[in-house]
Amino acid sequence: MHGFGHAAYAACARAYDGDEALSFRRLALGKPAAQAFRGGRLLCLPETSLQSLAEAAFHDLQFYPRASLVRDFARLAADESLDARERFALRSLLENALIAAEGSFPLCQDTGSAAVYGWKGQSIFVEGDDEAALAAGTLRAWSAHKLRNSQLLPSGRFDEANSGNNAPLSCELFAHPGADYRFLFVAKGGGSSNKTALFQETKALLKPAAFEDFARKALNGLGVSACPPYRIALILGGQSPEETLLAAKLATTGLLDGLPEGDSSAFGVIRDRDAELLLMKLASESGWGAQFGGRAMARDARVFRLARHAASLPVALAVSCAAHRQAMAYINENGVFLESLAGAEKIEGIMAEYGISASGGTGGQAEGLAPAPEVTRLELRPGAQALSGLKPGQMVALHGPVVLVRDAAHARLAAMIERGEALPAWTAYAAFYASPTETPQGAVLGSIGPTTSRRMDSYAESFLSRGFFKIMLGKGERSAAFSQSCARHGGLYLCAVGGAAALAAARYVRSQRVLDWPELGMEAVRLVELDGLPAMVAVAPDGGDFYAGIAR
């Protein structure tokens, strides 16, 4: 019996996502040269081919989604039984995909940590360093296409700084028999990575009632801060915790969909479709929905059983978010091939299958692809807000200035308070927890969307009690202590659609400039003028919390 490594290669070689075989295009890089070697032959590949492949892969997956993702969004967006707010979020994600496919604004502002998984055949010879070549191509993609640099390098126990180029690349290469080289390229955002969880369970979990109870609690704990609709992956077993977590990561990308079903004799891996249906049921019942409450928290699910040691039952839970970014590739004697992702024409065609027009809503509506439910205009200029009448779940359109401030800026402000220093004048503005991508040619700002708000909860009481950042804009649920701080000090927390960063940049941003702390790189403080950005009231000034009701 082969182990999980061979299972992953076998699945990668079949190249499925869901029940659909993936399609590929040949890159103009030439075929590997064949040379005789010990009675056989080697396929010799210059390292420049790996560089060009990595650059092309990371470009494509940042701007073009998989067709299966678009199809799931369209299917859900066309479901009139869903809540109007979650249908709005889904239509926003579809429109976001169309805008990103134009090639200027990436799908998500968090262009992620770059990762490459490779399965190298024994008859492939690369003239150079495989990992260095893949890393060089990745750096070229980030630089040439103005992607966001999010990686922090440690300079001491407590000190760190942005690498400035999104390095290093996470790269794992495996060996296998044969004459091909298979790849999976992944860009993974911090929000969805943060939802990965490892549990050390026992055989007691392997009973229907116990498994259902475990799964319900695990899914209810996911919340919406990682930008649903999710692909949810649950792995039961593994011969080490590391193997279990790797399987969860690969399952969220769809790579394991190519495995044969129902027979573990070859690889010790079984896909459990009945358990996947259960996860979908539990996700629907959770009430989290597609960000603003409802039934569409998950677009699909994957459950796999792996071989395990008799004394261990590691379990891993992971999600892939609405910015579901990966691309498969392979190299063989015929050349270098990259997965064909969905461009604008393909996206529009899928939408049309579900009666969604790219130019005017559905069913003859003329108000646009993603018309919001009834909205209230909210002025953001300091002193212009009338906040007392706002209620949890209410939709608003945001007009006026916000400052982009997130983790690093919050930490600096807290340190200034500790030292008794005067705070910057820009703390009077509304706070938007966001960091954009680099600005494309001719644009006002790069892709911009909210980061997970809960990371800022520990600062809320100190800031609100001093009268600044009374309005906060981000994504996802907050803590009970945060809601209590809003009630004491009249704070307002709003949620924008996560994963719709290209749409926000192209439609709702009128101007921007760096205000302070440019040395923070992507976390520098910026002043951004919004013009109609839709958002939902998540925590009202009286402390009423929309998401708290779902969590209960």
Image: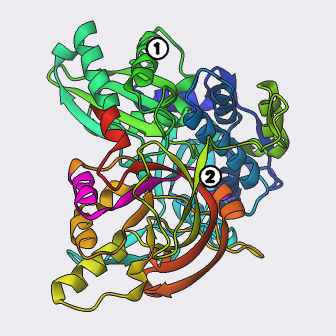
Image-based side of 194 in relation to 186, left or right:
left
**Membership of 496 in magenta stretch:** yes
Q: Amino acid at mark 1?
A: Leu
Pick the residue in front: 486 or 315.
Answer: 486
Residue that label 1 marks: 277
For label 2, count other residues whose C-alpha is less than 10 Å away and answer few (under 14), some (14-19) or many (20+): many
For label 1, count other residues whose C-alpha is less than 10 Å away and answer few (under 14), some (14-19) or many (20+): some
Image location (x, y in percent) of residue 439: 66, 74
Query: Vertically, is 380 above or below 500?
Result: below
Residue at 71% x, 72% y: name it. 440
Pick the residue in front: 536 or 285.
Answer: 536
Image location (x, y in percent) of residue 260: 54, 15
Magenta segment: 481-502
The mark lying in front, picked from 2 and 1, is: 1
Image-based side of 468 in relation to 139, left or right:
left
Query: Vertically, is 409 above or below 534?
Result: below
Pick the residue in front: 356 or 489.
Answer: 489
Local secondary structure at mark 1: helix
**Membership of 175 in magenta stretch:** no
Image location (x, y in percent) of residue 55: 67, 61
**Residue 328, visible in the rendered structure:** no
Pick the residue in front: 97 or 497.
Answer: 497
Local secondary structure at mark 2: strand
The quadrant in which residue 417 appears is: bottom left
Residue at 45% x, 50% y: name it. 537
Q: Which quarter shows the C terminus?
A: top left
